[in-house]
Image (spheres, grey):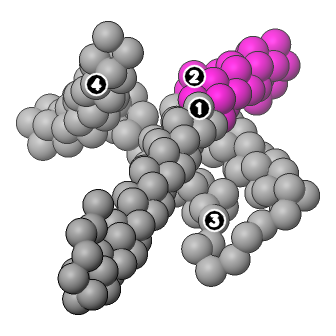
Amino acid sequence: MKRMMKKIVFRYGIVLSAICTILPLVSLLFNEWRDEMGKQLFFLAVLSLFCALGEFIIMESEERQYSKKEIIIRFFFHYLYMNLVVLFFGIKIGWFTILNRLEIGIVLVMIAIIYLINVIASYARDKSLAEKMNQKLLHLENQQEMRQKRQKRQKRCCKVKMEGKLCF
C-alpha cells in the first residue's frame, strides 16, 4: 500500500509538472497571450524552472563530505534564493504588491511551510534510500562471507580427499 501511494504521488507530480509546462506553451502558440490564464501559466512554468535551478545551491559534491555547518549554510542560502525568486515572480505576475505587508507576510509563511514540507519529504526519502542501500550492502557482505566459508570448506575437502579420507 505504501509503495502504491508513493507511485501515485510520483505520477501526480509528473503529470502536474507536464501540464504546467505544456499548457503555457500551447497558450503561447495558439492564443498569443489573449487570455490572462495563459500568462499566469507561463510565468508559473518559468517560476518552477527558476526554483528547480536553485538545487545547484544545495547540490552536494560527490568528491567531498560537507560538515553540518556547511550544509546548514547551503540550506539557508537555498531558502533565501527560493524566497527571492517567489517574491520577484509574484510581484512581476501581480499575485501581490510590494506595498501590502500582509500579503508579503502570508507569502513568506507559505514559502516557509512548503520549504519545510519539501525538506522533510526529501529527508524521509533519502533516509529510506540509505536504509535500503545498507540492507543490500549487508546482504552482499553476508553472501561474500558465505562464499568464502564455502571455498575454505571445499579447499579443506580437496586436501582431505587427496589423503584418501572422507570429507563432510
The quarter of the rendered structure image containing the N terminus is top left
Q: Label 2 vs label 4: CA separation?
A: 33 Å
* 95 in magenta: yes
Q: Residue at x 39, y 60 (%)?
A: 146
> Could you tell me residue 133's position as x and y percent?
48, 50
Indicate the position of residue 78 as horizontal and vertical percent values: 71, 50
Q: Dot 1 corresponds to which residue?
A: 124
Q: Which residue is mark 4?
A: 7
Magenta residues span 94-122
Q: Is residue 28 visible?
A: no
Could you tell me the amino acid type at mark 2?
Answer: Trp
Q: Which mark is residue 51?
A: none
Mark 2–mark 4 CB contact (< 8 Å): no
> Is residue 54 at all visible to an observer of this figure?
yes
Considering the image in quadrants, where does the C terminus appear? bottom left
Q: Amino acid at mark 1?
A: Ala
Q: Nearer the viewer's eye, disc 2 or disc 3?
A: 3
Name the N-terminal-most of marks 2 and 4: 4
